[in-house]
């Protein structure tokens, strides 16, 4: 036994995280995690990113997971964990592999009947894991040393295979104790395989539906990403030749440069001529589509669920039945070999398609407006861009922009947590390749909730370009239901950068007023690589996209129905 290599519990976790591909983790320290942080800091290849608060650390881990596929946030018991939980819930909604690690009370405290700090003062020391249970795939609580290796391994594997957050709590007195070193594990985790009989039956039924249809059309949804089925979607599209749209939360999953791409299907606020094609199709093929009140514009989308082929991560539904244990990529690859060319929907869209009108370009001295802001941002989007859109009008501005092949696109439309994007910007920037430039569109109301993470961007010298749209409040709420609660106190947003620099950082804040100011600021931002750039763009309170106004009226109606 003495020849068996030993490591601490914390080191075991650190080594497994690195094996699983993690380079950075996000944290806010607390006394229940300090020994654990010592062990993680000593792990080669693993870097600690210290955030301003636990919620922001969670948003950063969310952004990191979107880019790298896996992330971790480490916080202290209850006061840290319950602050983090809101971000974890959002990650659950978007199928992100985020490991939420919490230091826990001493393993003897429950048996000794102790009340401890950082709790609500009750004797129950299982409260944190019960709070997490509804918003994670699994909960693991290490209170016995002999459970440590097994639970750490199971937590990471569950997180990666389920594509959902997992909560891992480790008693603070155990993290520095020794256990046998990690044995070999295979990363990435091998993909699950479909039931061959169910797969064959599903493919036969779907191929018959498509081949007998006059005008099939495809809609690519957000669940394609966790299913890792992007290449399989492309194979089916190329085989069938039909028109392809994406849902608003899936923008960027299918290449917008593909000749069969027709835009975003979003009911009343769809891309031009897109809704007519999708809604008139006699065979809607829904690839990972998740229908919510937001993505259907208040349930006004015309999905024909009684006749559609509805393809989920591990299940296919159609009029012929529900086929379980059928994984999306397996199904689409097999289906691509069985379908005939069916391009009627694409021909129809080409007939409807109107020439793109010349863009209106503001004069340099014109007061900045949203149309001009959007036009100038579009001008700097390239294949190395990672575009982040905050909840609100930024969603609609982002939908109007063209993504060249290679560019990535990030929204949190399912959970819609205002303030998410500032932390997510940090996480995406840290997880991205060196030649990637993160561009974020953030409203002033959202930014005020999580602004501190600008200082973390400065500290770790990431260089996103943030366009801060300052229109004095919560514009998305204005369009849903206006009132005095939608107005906020104005800040000197560009001036915040100097405050966070504190004489040593390299962040750059610029406030613009005119179209010419914006052009000059963008030129300056592109060449500034030493830290983040925030460009404050004052806009009229009513200067929002027409799509937001239309969408807001439908969602408000859906909210008010009795």
Image: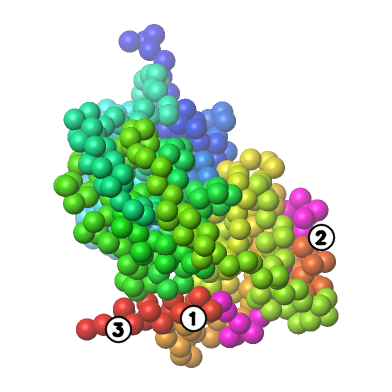
Query: Magenta region: which residues?
Result: 525-545
For mark 2, what is the residue?
524
What kind of element bears circle 1?
Answer: helix
Q: Residue at x 59, y 49 (%)?
A: 257
Judge whether residue 533 is colored magenta. yes
What kind of element bears circle 3?
Answer: helix
The location of residue 370, given as percent across then percent down, is: 65, 76
| Labelled disc at residue 560 | 3
| Labelled disc at residue 47 | none
What kind of element bears circle 2?
Answer: helix
Whether residue 489 can be seen here: no
Q: Residue at x 57, y 43 (%)?
A: 431
Discs 1, 3 touching: Cβ within 8 Å: no
Judge whether residue 480 is colored magenta. no
- Whichever of callouts 3 and 2 sits on the residue coming sooner in the sequence is 2
The location of residue 300, given as percent across then percent down, is: 34, 73
Q: Answer above or below: position of 431 versus 537.
A: above
How far apart are labels 1 and 3 at the CA level?
17 Å
Binning the other alpha carbons within 10 Å of mark 1 as few (below 14), some (14 to 19) or many (20 upward) gives: some
For mark 1, what is the residue?
549
- Whichever of callouts 1 and 3 sits on the residue coming sooner in the sequence is 1
Q: Residue at x 60, y 44 (%)?
A: 406
């Amino acid at each position: 036994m003495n020849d068996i290599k030993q490591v601490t519990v914390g080191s075991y976790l650190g080594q497994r995280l690195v094996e699983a591909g993690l380079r950075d983790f996000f944290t806010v320290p607390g006394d229940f995690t300090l020994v654990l942080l010592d062990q993680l800091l000593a792990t080669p290849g693993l870097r600690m990113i210290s955030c301003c608060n636990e919620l922001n650390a969670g948003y950063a881990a969310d952004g990191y997971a979107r880019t790298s596929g896996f992330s971790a946030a480490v916080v202290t018991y209850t006061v840290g964990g319950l602050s983090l939980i809101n971000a974890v819930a959002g990650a659950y909604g978007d199928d992100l592999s985020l490991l939420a690690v919490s230091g826990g009370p001493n393993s003897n405290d429950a048996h000794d009947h102790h009340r401890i700090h950082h709790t609500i003062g009750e004797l129950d020391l299982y409260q944190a894991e019960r709070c997490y249970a509804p918003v994670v795939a699994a909960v693991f609580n290490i209170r016995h040393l002999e459970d440590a290796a097994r639970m750490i391994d199971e937590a990471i594997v569950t997180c990666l295979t389920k594509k959902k957050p997992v909560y891992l709590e480790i008693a603070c007195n155990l993290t520095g104790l020794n256990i046998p070193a990690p044995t070999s594990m295979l990363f990435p985790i091998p993909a699950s395989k479909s039931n061959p009989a169910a797969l064959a039956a599903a493919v036969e039924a779907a191929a018959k539906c498509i081949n007998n249809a006059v005008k099939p059309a495809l809609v690519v949804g957000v669940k394609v990403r966790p299913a890792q089925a992007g290449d399989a979607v492309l194979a089916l599209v190329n085989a069938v030749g039909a028109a392809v749209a994406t849902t608003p939360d899936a923008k960027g999953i299918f290449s917008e440069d593909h000749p069969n791409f027709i835009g975003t299907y979003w009911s009343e606020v769809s891309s031009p001529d897109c809704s007519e094609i999708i809604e008139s199709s006699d065979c809607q093929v829904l690839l990972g589509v998740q229908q919510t009140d937001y993505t259907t514009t208040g349930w006004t989308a015309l999905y024909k669920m009684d006749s559609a082929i509805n393809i989920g991560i591990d299940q296919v539904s159609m009029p012929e039945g529900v086929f379980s244990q059928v994984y999306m990529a397996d199904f689409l690859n097999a289906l691509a070999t069985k379908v005939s060319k069916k391009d009627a929907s694409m021909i129809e869209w080409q007939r409807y398609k109107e020439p793109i009108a010349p863009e209106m370009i503001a004069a340099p001295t014109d007061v900045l407006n949203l149309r001009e802001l959007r036009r100038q941002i579009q001008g700097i989007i390239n294949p190395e861009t990672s575009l982040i859109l905050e909840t609100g009008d930024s969603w609609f501005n982002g939908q109007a922009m063209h993504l060249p092949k290679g560019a990535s696109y990030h929204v949190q439309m399912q959970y819609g947590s205002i303030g998410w994007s500032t932390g997510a910007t940090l996480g995406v920037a840290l997880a991205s390749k060196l030649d990637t430039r993160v561009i974020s569109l953030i409203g002033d109301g959202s930014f005020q909730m999580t602004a501190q993470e600008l200082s973390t961007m400065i500290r770790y010298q990431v260089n996103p370009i943030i366009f801060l749209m300052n229109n004095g409040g919560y514009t998305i709420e204005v369009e849903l239901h206006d009132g005095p609660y939608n107005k906020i106190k104005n800040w000197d947003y560009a001036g915040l950068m100097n405050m966070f620099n504190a004489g040593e950082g390299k962040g750059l804040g610029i406030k613009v007023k005119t179209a010419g100011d914006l052009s000059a600021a963008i030129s300056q931002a592109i060449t500034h690589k030493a830290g983040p750039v925030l460009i404050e763009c004052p806009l009229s309170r009513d200067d929002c996209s027409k799509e937001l106004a239309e969408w807001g009226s439908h969602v408000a109606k859906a909210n008010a129905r009795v």
